[in-house]
Image: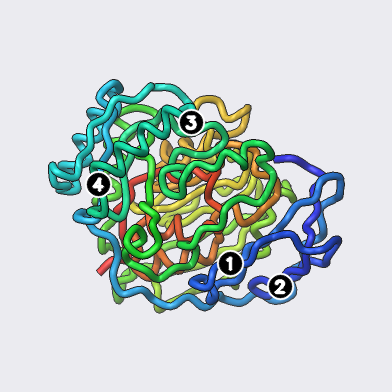
Amino acid sequence: MRMGLAIGLFLLVGGVRAEPEAEPSGRAPSAAAAALPSSAASPSAGGSAAPLTPVGRRWAAVMKVNGRLHATDLGVVINVDDPYSVKVGEYYAKARSIARDRVLKISLPVKAALTRDEFEGLSKQVDAFYGNRVQGLALAWRWPYAVDCNSITGALTMGYDAQLCKQTCSPSRASRYFGSYTLQPYKDLGMRLSMLLAARDVDQAIALIDRGVKSDNTLGLRGAPAVNVHFVTTSDALRSRRQVLFPPEGRVPALGLDVHLDQTDALRDADRVLMYLTGKERVEGLNTIEFVPGALADHLTSFGGMLDHANGQMSALSWIDAGATATYGTTSEPCAHLQKFPHPQALLLFYAGGATALEAYWKSVQWPQQGLFIGEPLAAPFGR
C-alpha cells in the first residue's frame, strides 16, 4: 500500500466526513447502487492522506433481496493438471450437489499468474461450456490467482483489463453489480461471478467447504444468540481508512447481530464472530478467534490476494486457515482507493439479508478488477 496518498474529494459516507484536498477523480456508483453510499477515496500521487473524521455514524439503506443463488446457478471449474484442483473440485461438486453437466474440466498451467493468451483460452472454454446456464463459478484451485495485474476472479467476471496494468493505482472498471438487487448477474449484467476455492492444502479446503455447507440457514433465527461483527481500526491509519464506512456500534436485534467498533491492532479471544474486517499488513491473534460457520473476514492491505508470497504481507489464506468461510485480497498494488475493497456495510447487510458469500462479497466492491474473492461461494447463513 503506497503511502503519501491524498483523498481527492469531499466525502460524506455513513455520517463520516473527509475534508477535500483536490478535485474529485473517483467514479460514482452505478444506478443500481444508489441506495449505498459510495466508498470513494481517490488517491493523488505526492500528497498526504486527508484526515478522516467521524461526525456521527448511520446505517446505509439496503433493501432486502428476496432470493439468492443456489447450486443450480453455479458451475465448478476443475484443472485436471492440478491434483489439488481435482480433489477439491470433486469434493465440492458432491457436497453442494452440483450437476455433472455444470462441472467443467480444463487443462491449465499451475502457476501464480496466467498470461493474457492463457487467460483468453480459459475464458473461451468457460463461455463455450456454460453459455447462459450459470450465474456464478467456483474455481477449484489455488493457482493461478491472477492474470497479469488482474485477479483471476476479476478477469473472469468482468473481462481482462490490460490498460489497468499500465498503472495499477488508477481507478479501475466500475462493477454494475455493486449494490445490485439482481438475482441473475450473468443474465442481467453479463457478469458470471467467480470465487476461488483456495486453501493451504486439500484438508483445509475440505474444512472450508464443510463450514460453508454447515452455515446454511443457521443465523438470524428468532430467539437465537447474537453473532458478533468486529469492524476494527488499527494503528495503521492508511490501511484503516474503511473506518469511515463503519456503521453505528451496538445490537441489531432484527438481524441477530452485535456490532463492535474496535480500536486495536489485533482482536483476541473473540467468540461467535461472523465478520472481522480490519486494516494492517499482518494480523496477529487469529488463532484465538472463534469464527462461526459462514464467517467473512479480510484485511485491507496491498497484496493480500497474492497467494504465493504476498510481498511480505499476510495472505488472505490466513483467514481461511483461522476458520473464515470467505475472504478477499488484492493481487496488485491498488493504492488508497476504498472502492477496490469491500464496503463494510454493503458486505454485512447483503449477507444478513440472505445473500450467499459469493453475492455479498461481489456486491460490496465497487472496483473489483484487482480483487481476489476466495471461499465457499454458496455459504448462506441467513438464507431462507
Query: Which residue appears at 38% of the width and 57% of the height?
Result: 190
Q: Are marks 1 and 2 in contact (CB under 8 Å)?
A: no
Q: 97 or 101, which lies in front?
A: 101
Judging from the image, what secondary structure is the residue with disc 2 in? strand
Q: Amino acid at mark 4?
A: Tyr
Q: Is residue 172 above or below residue 262?
A: above
> How many neighbours does mark 3 have within 10 angstroms: few (below 14), some (14-19), or many (20 or more)?
some
> How many neighbours does mark 2 have within 10 angstroms: few (below 14), some (14-19), or many (20 or more)?
some
Task: Please tell me the numbered disc located at residue 116.
Answer: 3
Percent position of residue 129, x then y: 23, 42
- Report the mark closest to the observer, 1 or 2: 1
Give how far apart the Cα atoms at labels 4 and 2 are.
42 Å
Q: Which residue is mark 1?
A: 29
- Report the mark closest to the observer, 1 or 3: 3
Label 3 vs 4, first from the N-terminus: 3
For this view, does 272 lie left or right of residue 78?
right
Label 4 vs 1, first from the N-terminus: 1
Label 4 vs 2, first from the N-terminus: 2
Q: Amino acid at mark 1?
A: Pro
Q: Amino acid at mark 2?
A: Leu
Q: Which residue is mark 2?
A: 12
Judging from the image, what secondary structure is the residue with disc 1 in? loop
Give how far apart the Cα atoms at labels 3 and 4 are.
21 Å
Q: Is residue 198 above or below residue 29?
A: above
- Report the mark closest to the observer, 3 or 2: 3
Percent position of residue 336, x then y: 70, 49
Task: Please tell me the numbered disc located at residue 130.
Answer: 4
For this view, does 26 lie left or right of residue 190?
right
